[in-house]
Image (cartoon, coloured by chain):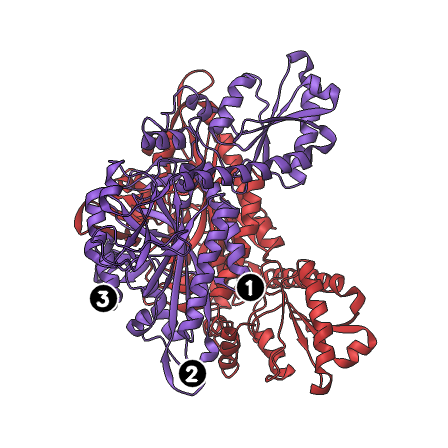
Chain colours: A purple, B red
Amino acid sequence: MTKESGKESQQAGNREITPQSEDFSRWYLDAIRKADLMDYAPVRGCIVFKPDGYELWELIQRQLDDRFKATGHRNAYFPLFIPESFFEKEKEHVEGFNPELPWVTEAGGEKLEERLAIRPTSETMIGHMYAKWIQSYRDLPVLINQWANVVRWEKRTMPFLRTSEFLWQEGHTAHEDEADARRETMQMLEIYKEFAENVLAIPVIAGQKTESEKFAGAVDTYSIEAMMRDGRAVQAGTSHYLGTNFATAFDIKYLDRENTQQFAHTTSWGVSTRLIGALIMVHGDDKGLVLPPKVAPMQAVLIPIGPPAKRESVLAKAAEVLADLKAAGVRVRMDDRSDLSPGWKFNEYEMRGIPVRIELGPRDLENGQAVLASRVSGEKRVVALDNLVAEVEKMLADVHKELYDRALQFMNDNLRSVDSLEELKANDDKLRGFVLAGWCGSRECESKVKEETGATSRNIPFEPGETKSTCLVCGEGAKHTVAFARAY
Amino acid sequence: MTKESGKESQQAGNREITPQSEDFSRWYLDAIRKADLMDYAPVRGCIVFKPDGYELWELIQRQLDDRFKATGHRNAYFPLFIPESFFEKEKEHVEGFNPELPWVTEAGGEKLEERLAIRPTSETMIGHMYAKWIQSYRDLPVLINQWANVVRWEKRTMPFLRTSEFLWQEGHTAHEDEADARRETMQMLEIYKEFAENVLAIPVIAGQKTESEKFAGAVDTYSIEAMMRDGRAVQAGTSHYLGTNFATAFDIKYLDRENTQQFAHTTSWGVSTRLIGALIMVHGDDKGLVLPPKVAPMQAVLIPIGPPAKRESVLAKAAEVLADLKAAGVRVRMDDRSDLSPGWKFNEYEMRGIPVRIELGPRDLENGQAVLASRVSGEKRVVALDNLVAEVEKMLADVHKELYDRALQFMNDNLRSVDSLEELKANDDKLRGFVLAGWCGSRECESKVKEETGATSRNIPFEPGETKSTCLVCGEGAKHTVAFARAY
């Protein structure tokens, strides 16, 4: 334990966390403050990612990066600044992002001839470079990802979920034809879904965005949508088939196998630090955070207990156990501070969401055992010290599964199907959960749902479970079955 | 091999690399272009880090990060934007950085009330946050590092070595007293030195910067300086003891063990993507790059050879060998393209600086052997296939050692000692290499060396080898023995 975290814990321990049922937003802000994940920065809408918050991102990053590399992608880095003229080249793109751009107008003591935007996303810059790099079908596909900071000057912000500057990855690929680009688009969406479920223990609904909700400049946008514990949705990842829109705007052309000039088909896909907000809102409870084991910076905490007289022998064994666990790759720390009670520590690490607590006392030592406690179920297991590493690993796997199952159950419990706008509004003034409904495909009907309920179309699920036949607003034939929800 | 790199190689193969002796700068630009490490971006002084260039950075990053974590540091992330008023708080700091800052003056469609600088370094922002986080001696030390992009609007730029936007890490720590802060400052310098030598195979001269060359706002700055193959220096890493300068400016105060308010003592330290430029200029030769094995994205290339009739059996064995090497953690790729000759491939991978080439042909198969070729010495070793993994690992270790020894020899050969400015200028109109000389400590004498030779004081070496007694300019008694050099 560093002195830093010790002190912050002591401060934190004196304050309460608002119950989720009372005020979910306040619960969220309390929980992340007490777990010391972030602080507000002195720049509008920006946060500081403190070490425990940033390490969550590092663990997300590494596990996603492995998946990108395993599917043939490589990382690169493109400039932060984008000349104003680049945005003008793709009409929908500039309309979508212009209102959110910060502009550099002076540098090195001089006014710039052309304003430079801070990147909100890099399709334009990367499109410009790909036009230089791609000449022939032999240069394709280009499969590149970038880890970077981006900025969108947002009006309403919320730590992790929506901040002016945030960290993300953006994949940008170029392909010979539509089929190959669409294959890539779906592959990356599938990777996001698998990652959300298997790493973050977050079940998601995968589907296609409607015209009005798609990415500015895309032909088709696909998303995974997760349900927070207040029933609101978070878009947890998106993958776009950009057609030849950016290729046309930036002249990404290649000589095909028949020696004819063709525009490349491009894709882009991204997830961001908002995943940190999502995993907290999906798994947390009234005690505070509950971290999914595969991204928890501390997966287990070892707490030696017992009277001072026995302290030395307990600590000696605890040090051994700690070394064994670390050697096995478990991210574990010991809290052997003698000025704090075990009870205080139990509360502290529950609040911080540490998946597994290991208790070791004099009696345990005599019996060759330790006690494991699960953060999610509260279950305690008495386990043999000889088998401790395997038992801790097993409980970590169980915690992951319990988190996923609980979140899936919650999502299913809060997913309903309606036939009309009236039915939608009837039993819920603040719409809660996902609502499946038929939709005729018109912007008017989609807007009306938003105006009257605050819910937006999240996506058109690939597997809606049931198919609705009439539009919930106009009653005409439904083209799609859509998942609506209020969203962060 | 991806199609992308295949095509670029074919293009590259047709162009020449200027010899180092003819024009070292052109050699450098040719070498990095042919190895496909970067491209120029459409923003002044910015580059795109292409995959082979970025992966060098990823490998540097991971190995440095391990060292930071092993010494108790954790990563965090602070905002890109720094309010103008923050710079005003530390007088020397603002004077040092103001000329290089880009300013955001508009965002979200409105003119900002206060201009925001793009960070050139983060002492001010982090100082502001530390003032909030640090209250008591129990909160100290704070040991935080940040991996980030920074921007300095430079007049003259050079890929990797000096670009408007670059990537770096910046450590920022706060301590109870001077002794602890100075211990940290030296520890981090020592880590940089060990990393340069043991990972990048670059020998360096560690020492203290003179007053005029130190970091804007520091009490003392220390650096490691490396020698490029044209005899010029590159500052490869710096570590600063900031005293209480930033603590005073930002009010980083704590209650000490005697219950008295004290200012914290802070440090900062950083290395950047200029290390990529340095390792190329230290190790490269007229054939192109020579990559130090521990950061080479491709450590070994496997090239199957022989007539088409035998191709199938060679490829089958090559696939086995490839799998074995990968399983052992060697970063290896196979180039089995049938439309390119082995000779062409040999040249190609020499140009790209791949440390070890593995040749495998039908006769090798019969004899249960393979041929290894070292990029640095050209040495060829016939080795038993049964022992291939160990032999490749051995040659990688040998290449590292040869690179280091060669660079050290070169540095020593180009290190001389002079007693006067006249002697310095006598046999060299373009000063080449490091020059040790006595210095009285006055700014005037230091400036005169620069004016008349273009050389700047690099640092005051901890281990100069010899101690000079008189100042090379004024002839008065020397306070220090300084290493001068022309620098990038």
Is B139 positioned to the left or the right of A24 in the image? Answer: right
Q: Which of the 4 quarters of the picture holds residue A217?
A: bottom left
Q: Are marks 2 and 3 in contact (CB under 8 Å)?
A: no
Disc with the residue nearer the chain's start (2 vs 3): 3
For the residues beneath circles 1 and 3, the answer to whether they share a chain is no
Q: CA distance from mark 1 to mark 2?
A: 42 Å
Residue at (42%, 27%) from the top-left corner? A286
On what subunit does the disc labeled 1 rest? B
Q: In the rendering, at what x and y percent does residue B62 appear?
A: 55, 51
Residue at mark 3: A91
Residue for point 32% across, 67% down: B42
Side of B461 relative to A470 (left or right): right
Task: Assign a secondary structure to mark 2.
Answer: loop
Image height of B350 relative to B264, above or below: below
Q: Nearer the viewer, mark 1 or mark 2?
A: 2
Asked if residue B241 can be seen in this view, the reply is no
Kindly indicate whether the residue at mark 3 contacts the one at mark 1 (C-beta within 8 angstroms): no
How far separated are the C-alphas under marks 1 and 3? 47 Å
* Label 2, label 3: how far apart the Cα atoms are: 27 Å
Q: SS at mark 1?
A: helix
Query: At label 2, which amino acid type do we have?
Result: Asp
